[in-house]
Amino acid sequence: MCPELYLRSVNILEDAEKEMLAIDVCREGIDIMLPKTRHFIFMVRDLDPRGANILKQEMLAVGGEAAISYSAICDITKPTDCLLSGTERQFSIAMAKLRLQPFGLKSLAGQLECAMLNLGSKRNRALGPLGLGRTLVMGILNVTPDSFSGDGVTDAKEAVRRAIQIEADGADIIDIGGESTRPDAAPVTAEEEAARIVPVIQSLAGKLKIPISVDSRNPEVVEKALEAGAGIVNLVGGLRDRRMSEILAKTDVPIILMHMQGEPGTMQKNPVYRDVMDDIVAELRKQVAEAEGIDPCRIILDPGIGFGKTVEHNLEIIRRLGEMRITGMPIMIGASRKSFIGKTLGGEPAERLEGSIASAAAAAMNGADIVRVHDVRETVLAMRMADAIFHPSLRSIK
């Protein structure tokens, strides 16, 4: 009898464990082998070349790899980037030795350990009662006359009616905003923004079962929205204001930090990145570190699709979204109806349903915990299907 070869796509540890159990591997053997089935690739930036050479030796010694600049071999004055590749088991062995080494390698070992813990943690880690394990859907309610998507409302009663419908359509969260942040949008005063959204939040606070998120950059508006009943703060452009930090430090609500390069009026002029995902992660890490009095466990990260990014940047962000999981924080993404979809497929914002759902499904596959969307009912069904495919333990068959 000739053996026959088949390929296995092992996307999560549960897949590998299932395959081993199917061929009757003992429990002890499974525990030893599982760390060998998880493979990681990390980029280390600006490494001392002396440390880079030690790192390469240690990774090669355990069967892994470390790709460094050719110049690092003979020039110890110029930092090098380093691409690390290995299994969880190989990194674990190497880290024990790196902790004893100079040139920043002790710090790197700690970062590697933290990264692998984060990458192995459960989904929806810091979402409190929202942490259901599945992909959550945030429904958008724009209380503005100039929303890019064409779905803004200016009448408070109509906004309340639409919010109730968003909940009925299956949204887990509703996000209410009173200022358009599309490119070249006219600025809105804090008084006008608050006048648009606070009455709506007050009216909805006793009517909705799902939490209300306030979408704003203005500390005064956020403060009034929280007093009116909002339970989540969605910060377009991230945490850039000391007054905002002071307000949020006094609460315990979840906070969404969204990356934006520049300001709405200038962000699309000529966005440039060294590496789009690395730069986004670095900026959001900086904001988290500087958020005085705010527990990182309350923070959700959003890479900011369309906010200072080209079409190519946006597509790359969705494709590489799983890399943000290195932070250990939940991830939200808002690609719904945005211009990169129109530039890829054609069509005005209201005609971008298919591209929006495809983007949400790809994001869910790559690690998104929350997708922020205009078309709630359709996206809720798409996320149930995506979760059934990519997260079998969450599947419920009707």
Image (cartoon, rainbow, N blue to C red):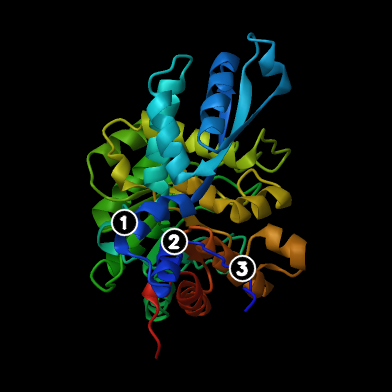
Question: According to the image, label 3 marks what residue?
Answer: 7
Disc 3 crowd rating (10 Å Cα; few below 14, some 14-19, many 20+) is few
Q: Amino acid at mark 1?
A: Leu
Q: Earlier in the sequence, mark 2 or mark 3?
A: 3
Number of the label disc, if any, that sits on residue 270 = none
Residue 302 appears anywhere in the view? no
Which quadrant would residue 99 be assigned to in this image?
top left
Residue 185 appears anywhere in the view? yes
Residue reaching furthest to the bottom: 398
* Numbered disc in front, either 2 or 3: 3
Which quadrant would residue 362 be assigned to in this image?
bottom right
- Residue 329 percent location from the top left of the image: 39, 47
Q: Amino acid at mark 3?
A: Leu
Question: What quarter of the picture does the C terminus occupy?
Answer: bottom left
Left or right placement of residue 202 versus residue 24 in this view: left
Q: Is residue 72 above or below residue 77?
A: below
Q: Earlier in the sequence, mark 1 or mark 2?
A: 1
Number of the label disc, if any, that sits on residue 370 = 2
For the residue labelled by badge 3, is the local secondary structure a helix, a strand or a loop?
A: loop
Cα separation between marks 3 and 1: 36 Å
Q: Is residue 79 above or below residue 243?
A: above
Q: Amino acid at mark 2?
A: Ile
For the residue labelled by badge 1, is the local secondary structure a helix, a strand or a loop?
A: loop
Question: According to the image, label 1 marks what residue?
Answer: 127
Do the CB atoms of the residues marked 1 and 2 lie less than 8 Å apart?
yes
Name which residue lies at 68% across and 48% down.
313
